[in-house]
């Protein structure tokens, strides 16, 4: 126990990174048992005696006051013993048990919850985020105990403007919105998709230091086309097919109007919308509201950072990026987002927008290679279709293995949502890549949907590859003391910084320049030495540091584009006069950090 407490105390110290020394008081409008039942303010046994007197808590708690460090150690001890006691059980059962114990703390005491999350982010991210969050969404109706966030359904049409005022927080900075239509690679999960919005916002709090009282997960329940859920007696969503067309858009419109009427400075992150609505809503709202689509725009930046890393890993200058042959597998919101940003980057590096555009980028979907001969091609995919006969020996619809064998690409990047499609044969074909360090990105989530495992990638494609996956895999032991490094190429490296930078700049929209700055910041974060070892992204342990840097880069881009309107006491002129270091410090100072603040009651 003592050792554990020492560990806890040291990790508590370590994670004080961006906190202010003495927490200011926090105004609370409730007293007594109501405070104990409010996870924003509850300190459990940690309420000091004077506070118990002031807030009418005397007698409602056991007499001994337990320090924050002791509470922390107690939680970690129960978590570690759960781990030990479930060692031999199936992975899914263990992950859900871990999620439950974390979720119970989340429901009870958010300060302690977020502190353990920040300090143990590498261990806990796979529980509160991908892959376990996928399992949680799949089982949400059965796991449901308490609501979290807001639910707007097709039945609420005409009511949303008043409903939004039911949310108890006066200020909301960050909203993650989903309609549940494409949750990770798991398809349409209807109302159960709220779990992904909750998980993303947990990452916002942990990585970007957004105050948990100012976040809001939102589910737009417009029905589901998942027959299994419609027939499930426990299913908690609307039992009707999804709304389509104008009916659908009118629900999203109404929500956006309501949210921005109450909180004009909020930012809305669209998450896990099926492709047609992902693109349509982005186009519809991005000039009117502070919003972005994480799957298109967040993923694009993370993908681009990884692609630039692979150029550096080959010891080549970034200007060589336009010559890299990249095969993207999956022509959905994520794959097309990556291709668009990669095309723009290739054009920039080549210094000529006209000639460089998507010269070496290839797109494969469920029907094979996409060429201009494709019937009913989706307009968003059309710019990436190859011309007829452009690649000798490759026809419209050529299979993935044909494409890889013919092109010998530098990079094979999967965002298909289909587990295992980088088969042994495909991976072996990557050994013939023209690159000295071929790159395999199996970015689909959750783990079982990854295009290949890390072990298979190193086994079949060779030990000299660079590898990244959307959900975490362990590093691979290659024998003789050699290790195959596994990167996690997940938009979690960018969306928190995009949101934070937008908030602190006060930009009224999120421009391409701000997104590009975020991606470039991530791309330049790793040293050449790390890149040579195949390490393309920072460790999840340092996600708070990288998010601060990304946030600062976004603020500076907003200032440069004259979009920044300031935040709180800091006006646009002050932002404009900040040096790079001062901007970073400004961002760090504005990141919330979980400590118990003295509570002051006000009626
Ligand atoms: N690592 C990360 O940060 C991110 C990962 N993703 C993952 O990417 C995946 C796809 O997401 P979206 O693009 O939004 O989905 P989507 O449903 O819009 O697109 C999926 C695409 O994959 C293609 N596809 C399906 N089966 C295929 C096959 N057998 N071979 C080749 N292509 C095939 C489809 O034709 C479609 O073009 C999901 O698993 C999601 O979890 C998405 C966003 C971020
Ligand atoms: C990571 C993410 O946003 C996705 O898989 O959809
Ligand atoms: Mg997503």
Image (cartoon, rainbow, N blue to C red):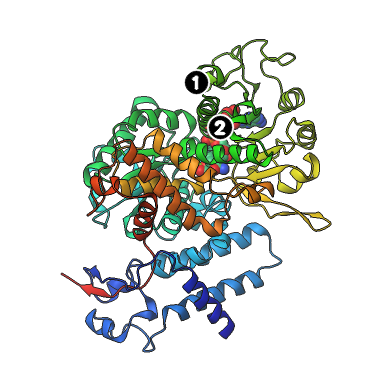
State the image coordinates of residue 228 (x, y, percent, origin top left). Answer: 55, 41
Q: Quadrant of the N terminus?
A: bottom right
Q: Which mark is residue 7?
A: none
In the picture provided, is 561 more to the left or to the right than 90? left
Give the Cα distance between marks 1 and 2. 21 Å
Q: Quick check: can you spot residue 577?
A: yes
Q: Does residue 371 sit above or below 220 in this rendering?
A: above
Q: Quadrant of residue 595?
A: bottom left
Discs 1/2, front? 1
State the image coordinates of residue 44 (x, y, percent, origin top left). Answer: 38, 77
Q: Quick check: can you spot residue 219?
A: no
Q: Residue at x 53, y 18 (%)?
A: 382
Q: Quadrant of the C terminus?
A: bottom left
Kind of element beneath mark 1: helix
In the picture provided, is 541 more to the left or to the right than 150? right
- Residue linked to disc 2: 335
- Residue linked to disc 1: 353
Q: Residue at x 24, y 79 (%)?
A: 55
Looking at mark 2, is its residue's CB closer than 8 Å to ligand 1?
A: yes
User: How many other residues sit within 10 Å of disc 2, few (<14), some (14-19) or many (≥20)?
Assistant: many
Residue sitting nearer the eye, 319 or 10: 319
State the image coordinates of residue 495 (x, y, percent, origin top left). Answer: 45, 46
Mark 1 or 2, nearer chain start: 2
Residue sitting nearer the eye, 232 or 215: 215
In the picture provided, is 411 more to the left or to the right than 29? right
């Amino acid at each position: 126990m003592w050792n554990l407490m020492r560990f806890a105390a040291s990790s508590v110290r370590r994670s004080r990174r961006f906190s202010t020394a003495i927490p200011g008081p926090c105004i609370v409008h409730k007293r007594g048992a109501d405070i104990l039942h409010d996870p924003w303010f509850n300190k459990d046994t940690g309420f000091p005696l004077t506070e118990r007197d002031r807030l009418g808590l005397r007698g409602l708690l056991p007499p001994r006051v337990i320090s924050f460090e002791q509470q922390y150690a107690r939680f970690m001890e129960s978590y570690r013993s759960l781990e030990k006691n479930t060692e031999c059980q199936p992975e899914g059962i263990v992950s859900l048990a871990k999620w439950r114990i974390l979720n119970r703390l989340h429901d009870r005491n958010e300060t302690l919850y977020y502190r353990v999350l920040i300090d143990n982010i590498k261990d806990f991210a796979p529980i509160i985020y991908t892959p376990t969050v996928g399992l949680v969404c799949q089982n949400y109706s059965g796991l449901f105990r308490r609501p979290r966030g807001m639910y707007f359904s097709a039945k609420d049409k005409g009511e949303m403007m008043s409903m939004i005022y039911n949310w108890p927080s006066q200020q909301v900075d960050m909203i993650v919105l989903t309609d549940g239509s494409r949750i990770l690679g798991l398809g349409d999960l209807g109302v159960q998709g709220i779990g992904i919005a909750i998980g993303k916002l947990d990452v916002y709090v942990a990585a970007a230091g957004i105050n948990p009282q100012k976040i809001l997960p939102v589910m737009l329940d417009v029905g589901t086309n998942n027959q299994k859920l419609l027939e499930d007696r426990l299913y908690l969503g609307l039992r009707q097919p999804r709304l389509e067309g104008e009916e659908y858009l009118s629900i999203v419109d109404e929500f956006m109007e309501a949210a921005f009427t109450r909180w004009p400075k909020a930012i809305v992150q669209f998450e896990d919308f099926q492709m047609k609505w992902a693109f349509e809503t982005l186009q519809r709202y991005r000039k009117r509201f502070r919003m972005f689509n994480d799957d298109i725009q967040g993923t694009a930046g993370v993908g681009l950072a990884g692609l630039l890393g692979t150029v550096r890993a080959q010891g080549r200058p970034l200007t060589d990026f336009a010559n890299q042959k990249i095969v993207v597998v999956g022509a959905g919101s994520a794959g097309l987002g990556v291709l668009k940003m990669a095309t723009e980057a290739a054009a920039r590096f080549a210094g000529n927008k006209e000639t460089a555009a998507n010269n070496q980028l290839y797109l494969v979907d469920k029907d094979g290679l996409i060429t201009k001969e494709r019937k009913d091609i989706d307009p968003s995919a059309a710019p990436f279709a190859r011309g007829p006969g452009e690649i000798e020996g490759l026809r419209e619809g050529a299979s993935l293995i044909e494409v890889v064998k013919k092109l010998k690409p530098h990079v094979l990047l999967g965002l298909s949502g289909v587990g295992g499609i980088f088969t042994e044969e495909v991976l072996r074909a990557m050994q013939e890549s023209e690159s000295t360090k071929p790159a395999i990105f199996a970015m689909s989530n959750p783990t079982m949907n990854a295009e290949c495992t890390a072990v298979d990638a190193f086994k079949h494609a060779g030990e000299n590859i660079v590898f990244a996956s959307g959900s975490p895999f362990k590093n691979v032991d290659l024998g003789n003391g050699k290790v195959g490094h596994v990167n996690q190429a997940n938009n979690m490296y960018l969306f928190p910084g995009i949101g934070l930078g937008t908030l602190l700049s006060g930009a009224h929209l999120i421009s391409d320049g701000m997104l590009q700055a975020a991606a470039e910041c991530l791309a330049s974060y790793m040293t050449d030495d790390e890149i040579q070892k195949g390490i393309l992204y920072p460790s999840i342990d340092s996600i708070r540091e990288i998010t601060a840097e990304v946030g600062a880069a976004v603020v500076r881009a907003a200032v440069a584009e004259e979009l920044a309107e300031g935040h709180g006491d800091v006006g646009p002129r002050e932002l404009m006069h900040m040096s790079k270091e001062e901007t970073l410090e400004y961002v760090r100072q504005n990141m919330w950090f979980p400590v118990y603040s003295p509570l002051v009651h006000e009626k």
